[in-house]
Amino acid sequence: MIVRMLVILLWLPLQAAAQGFAGLGSDADGFAVPTPDPVFDFPQDHGAHPDYRIEWWYLTANLTGPDGTAYGVQWTLFRSALAPETREGWSDPQVWFAHAAVTTPEEHFVTERVARGGVGQAGVSVQPFEAWIDDWQMAGPSFDALTLTARGGDFAYDLTLQATGPLVFHGENGFSVKSAQGQASYYYSQPFYEVAGTLTLPQGEIPVTGSAWLDREWSSQPLAETQSGWDWFSLSFDTGDKLMGFLLREDDGASFSSATWIAADGTTTAYPNGAFTAQPRDWSEVAGREVPTEWAVQLPDKGIDVTVTALNPNAWMAVSIPYWEGPVTVEGSHTGHGYLEMTGYE
């Protein structure tokens, strides 16, 4: 999703902080806002949209080593605008930051980078595609064929990604509504990457293969003032079908949901608020707080009734504004794997 927007608070005006989670319900004065019936222009829309306040290139991967051990990888580049324009040099109002993580059944490695726009330290170009911050890079001849690299103090990865299916558009042809009040984003994904490469962990290099899911999203006011956090699921089933679903939690205990069913051939079905449900089944103490790490997830229209369980309950993203994100397993009416992101648990 998403939203993954928790970290944006670092770069929003201070007076916005009380308006929705991480200030993301604050007024978008001066910025462009998403409207229904979008017309996407590729490859240009794989690049940045500086007239919108927030944007991200967000990849998660479920990988397996030679001995069958499961791993998760995250690579995210965020753009946040202080003003809807670009300028050369340090006065550029575009701010970039990034997160990279590797999750194993026993450990979770994470680091972050921050950069100012206008000086070449971070950015996105589209022909050929390249998204970068410092020496972290997601790049290739096209959006369908990419190399992904990042490193932290105690981990690194070098992966190749090849798309085997089409782009997927969420909501109403890419217009993704986030609240009953109508806040929205533009949101599409490439959930069909096959992955191969190498993880470098304290125990050495590990060859891995698997699959990856890349989310693209941009907006200026994606949340309502009353929304305090979210739970986002990307699930890949052994049948080849996939499911994206999220809950945006309200201050009063209610929630707003949305989902996209992605058939194995890439055709989609969008589901409105209430069709997708997710209920916590078990909680873990993580970084001094209680976080749900086992969920009952249902989409009755597709016969989905599954238990989603964290591979490692301690997949806490200890970054400037922390959150939980990690790989999950899926059991029940369908089996498979995926990723879970949770914010707003304090």
Image: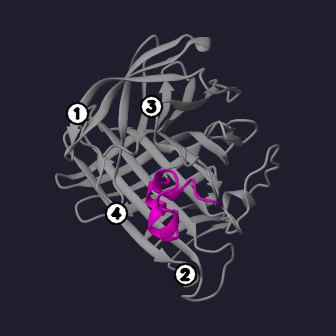
- Residues at discs 4 and 1 in contact (Cβ within 8 Å): no
Q: In which quarter of the image is residue 263?
A: top right
Q: Is residue 13 left or right of residue 52?
A: left
Q: Position of residue 202 (x, y in %)?
A: 18, 55
Lower position in the chain sequence, tag 3 or tag 1: 3
Question: Alpha-carbon distance for marks 3 and 1?
Answer: 20 Å
Residue 21: in magenta span: yes
Question: Alpha-carbon distance for marks 2 and 1?
Answer: 41 Å
Q: Position of residue 313 (x, y in %)?
A: 25, 36
Q: Residue 253 carries which label?
A: 3
- Residues at discs 2 and 4 in contact (Cβ within 8 Å): no
Question: Alpha-carbon distance for marks 3 and 2?
Answer: 44 Å
Q: Position of residue 182 (x, y in %)?
A: 69, 42
Amino acid type at circle 3 is Gly
Residue 85: in magenta span: no
Label 4: element kind: loop
Q: Where is residue 1 in the image (x, y as percent from the top left)?
A: 54, 44
Lower position in the chain sequence, tag 2 or tag 4: 2
Q: Residue at x 35, y 42 (%)?
A: 72
Label 2: element kind: loop
Question: Alpha-carbon distance for marks 4 and 1?
Answer: 22 Å
Lower position in the chain sequence, tag 4 or tag 1: 1
Q: Which residue is drawn at 55% across and 65% down?
A: 79
Amino acid type at circle 2 is Gly
* Camera-nearest label, 3 or 4: 3
Lower position in the chain sequence, tag 3 or tag 4: 3
Q: 139 or 335, which lies in front?
A: 335
Please indicate, yes or no, whether residue 275 appears anywhere in the rendered image.
Answer: yes
Residue extending farthest left:
203
- The residue carrying mark 4 is 320
Please give the range of residues in magenta: 5-27
